[in-house]
Image (cartoon, helix red, strand yellow):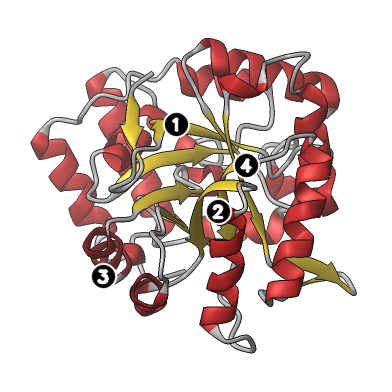
Amino acid sequence: MQQRYIGNSGLRSSALSLGTMTWARETDDQDASELLRTFVDAGGTLVDTAASYADGQAEALLGALLGDVVSRTEVVISTKAGVSPSDGRQKVDASRNAMLSGLDASLARLGTDYVDIWFAQAWDPNVPLDETLSALDFAVRSGRARYAGISNYNGWQTAKAAAVAGFPLVANQSEYSLVRRNAEAELIPAVEDAGLGLMAWAPLGRGVLTGKYRGHVPADSRAAGTRFAAYVEPYLEQPASRVVEAVAMAARGLGRSSLDVALSWLLTRHGVATAVVGARTPVQLKEILDAQLTPLPAEIARALEDVSSGSPAL
């Protein structure tokens, strides 16, 4: 698998990263073990998690696999703090106290004394930005994080964070795909100007760009369940469905899968360092790893961009 530098830093990551949002809930221990080993065997390096995933259980599951399934040195681990559940909803608290307490808890669950990238998971309008950044800086200076980044910050928030920070931020994690291209307006220019790399989450449009939702909702899919139905639902209607059909048509013409077309398009976009794929099962991961991930013909890429350019920010 291709290895890339993240932004202007010396940190390298595989072009695809393995996301763990479903771990310890939809993805059990056995499947997680197989996912991790298969991913690393294919040349994958970066595994992304967060303290908020399954209330910390995703981190704990990953930590349980380190040493037994893969060694710590085989993987680049990124995790996030600043978001926690509260009364069934997610609460943002990016204060210095919450962030550093969250990092300590993450390290304990992961069973490691450092993470490779530590992110502030969301912008907190109630906390001074320099306070949040001071937590990231302290984590790096204390050796508990090798690098620091921000997640789900928009364009102006990214530019401000990069300007205010007295240390280099290396990455921004944000949603980006053919069905959600609003990052191109301000975020990607801000990321590139600041020397950050974009870690694109939901690069397959929360699953719809694989084509599996065309005409029906599979019984074993996220959209059919209760936990993630609302997460997928906005992408099941127009204008996203028009983009899905265009991707399927391109895939047929090229003799490639829809997910290959979608990921290949994304990985050639400005600023993108890695695409975070959240395969729930070993079968899904195999389909992703079987993708060619080679640049699309220019005329095909332009056609997909024309079809998807009118998609609103969902």
| Mark 2 or mark 1, earlier in chain | 1
Separation of marks 2 and 4 at Cα, in angstroms: 10 Å
* 3D distance between C-alphas at marks 3 and 1: 24 Å
State the CA–CA distance, disc 3 to disc 2. 31 Å
- On screen, residue 302 versus residue 129, left or right, reads left
Residue type of the residue flagged with mark 3 = Ala
| In contact (CB < 8 Å): disc 2 and disc 4 | no
* Residue type marked 1: Leu
In terms of image quadrants, where is residue 286? top right
The residue labelled by disc 3 is 185
Which one is earlier in the sequence, the residue at label 3 or at label 2?
2
Q: Secondary structure at mark 2?
A: helix
Sequence-wise, the earlier of marks 3 and 4 is 4
Question: Circle 2 sits on which residue?
Answer: 140
Name the residue furthest right: 87
Write down the residue under mark 4.
115
* Residue drawn 39% across the image and 62% down it: 239
Between label 3 and label 2, give the one nearer the viewer: 2
Label 4: which secondary element:
strand
List the single residue furthest toward the front: 142
